[in-house]
Image (cartoon, helix red, strand yellow):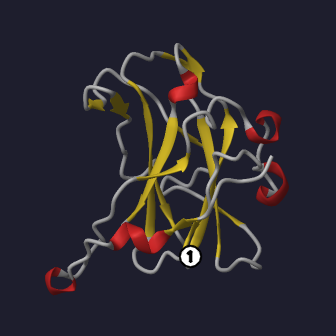
Amino acid sequence: MALGAALDGSELFRRLDLSRVVCPSNIASDWVDLRDEGSVDAADNAGSDITNPDTQITDAGAHILKKIKAGTVLRLRLRYDDGDTLTTDPVVQVFGRHSDDGGWQRLRNKSGNIDLTLSDAATDVEDGTDKFSDVDEDANSFDLDGCDQVIVGVKTAAAGTNPELCAVEGKVI
């Protein structure tokens, strides 16, 4: 199966106001789907560690976020149906590269781990339709290490009431 269309990272910064930048600074950006609904309920690479994103991340709901021009940290969260109760939390792995022909590298979260478990919790924020997992500053944050493209692979698939309604959202700060 082919990947979904590439996402233009410059769209994340359409509200950037350079007159308000302070040091140290982060970038205000919107959350975007890096894994669409219906692409988190099946594992890439049969549930094993992903070692070759080009051949092991093939779901059409997976998107390469390209043209990251500002920001140094990727944050991830889980968006899921507010009526869902997950019986298996999805586990994701993150990869980055500098150009279309550059090699992928594994990105570790600020806790030093290659796996990120995106858990549902009673304290998750909701908007009446969806819930959004808590974003831990260390566990859910990945230094981009100079990469301007990222892709998220699913190591462990989500399972529960409506796992096909789960999505992985990302933002660069």
48 vs 60, nearest the viewer: 60
Whether 171 is drawn above or below 88: the answer is below
> What amino acid type should be assigned to the residue bearing mark 1?
Asp
Label 1 SS: loop
142 vs 76, nearest the viewer: 76
Residue at image location 25% in from the left, 71% down from the top: 15
Whether 71 is drawn above or below 171: the answer is below
Q: Which residue is mark 1?
A: 148
Relative to 67, 1 lies left or right:
right
User: Which percent across, then down, holds residue 103?
Assistant: 77, 73
Give the tally of numbered discs: 1
Whether 43 is drawn above or below 87: the answer is below
Residue at image location 80% in from the left, 46% down from the top: 1
User: Which percent across, then down, holds residue 21?
Assistant: 20, 81
Quick one: label 1, few (<14), some, or many (20+) residues within 10 Å? many
Single out the residue that lies furthest toward the bottom. Answer: 19
Quadrant of residue 10 within the rendered picture? bottom left
User: Which percent across, then down, holds residue 170?
Assistant: 45, 54
Which quadrant of the rendered structure holds the C terminus?
bottom left
User: Which percent across, then down, holds residue 24?
Assistant: 25, 78
Relative to 89, 135 lies left or right:
left
Residue at image location 46% in from the left, 30% down from the top: 119
